[in-house]
Amino acid sequence: METVPRETELSPWFVTGLIEGLGTFTFSRRFGDRLDLYFAIKVPGRDRHLLEGVQAFLSVGRIYDVKPARKEKRVADTPSPSEGAHSESLAPPDVTASRIYYRVHRKHELEAIVAHLDRYPLQGAKKELYRLWREIATRVSRPFRQINWSEVMDLARELSDASPRRRSRGAS
């Protein structure tokens, strides 16, 4: 297993660039109008050292191995004279490459993500997603009884609607 040596420190702008390219700002709902925020980066298994570097740089979060998904591929067989034009069969399952997942979800740890991106801001398309996610993070960090969950859920819907994944699913 390759690791980033302790004496190697990542550039803060490199970390921001990695977040711009591969980072995810998201949430999951729980107990009706409440939600949990998540920040994550997913990379191929061979790039584990990058996530270990980010984790060491930010001093928060956990790294998880993502089990490879099994996919079955349909392949066209060469037809035999008795089968007619064409037949299709299942090929042996194809195992996708392993992935590594860095995730931050504890409220006090999310503050490190906010502090980093406030100091070294995103410059591209994720800037708006981060702005929405940051606003949610700020609101849910308040004492529980001071949180306006209706406003938080409105922001969460806006974040969900702005997500590139959501837009690509809706376009098809």
Image (cartoon, grey):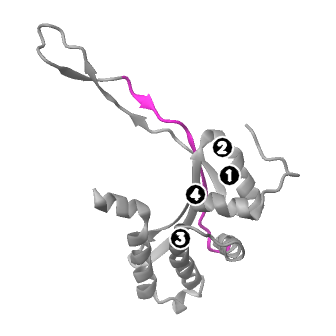
Q: Which mark is residue 51?
A: 1
**Is disc 2 in contact with disc 1, using a CB cutoff of under 8 Å?**
yes
Whether tag 1 and tag 4 are in contact, CB under 8 A, the answer is no
Closest to the observer: 58 or 131? 131
Counting residues from the start of the chain, the first of labels 4 and 3 encountered is 4
Kindly state the secondary structure of the residue where label 1 is placed: helix
For residue 59, say whether it is visible. no
Q: Which residues are magenta?
A: 92-108
Circle 3: element type: strand
Instruction: Tell me the crowding category of disc 3: few under 14, some 14 to 19, or many 20 or more residues within 10 angstroms, Cα based.
Output: many
Q: CA distance from mark 2 to mark 1?
A: 7 Å
CA gap, disc 1 and disc 4: 13 Å
Image disc number at residue 134: none
Check disc 3 and give the amino acid type: Leu
Amino acid type at circle 2 is Asp
Badge number at residue 47: 2
Specify whether residue 95 is painted magenta.
yes
Amino acid identity at mark 1: Leu
Does residue 80 appear left or right of residue 9 in this picture? left
Q: Secondary structure at mark 2?
A: helix
Q: Which mark is residue 21?
A: 4
Query: What residue appears at the point 67 percent right and 64 percent down from the top-left corner?
Result: 16
Residue 110 falls within the magenta-colored stretch: no
Question: Mark 3–mark 2 contact, CB under 8 Å?
Answer: no
Residue 172 x, y percent position in the rendering: 27, 56
- On the image, which quarter does residue 76 sit in? top left
Residue 37's label in the rendered image is: 3
> Compared to 142, does 35 lie above or below?
above
**Which comes sooner in the sequence, label 3 or label 2?**
3
Q: Give the CA separation, mark 4 to mark 3.
A: 19 Å
Q: Is residue 102 above or below residue 74?
A: below
Q: Which percent across, then down, holds residue 145?
A: 52, 90
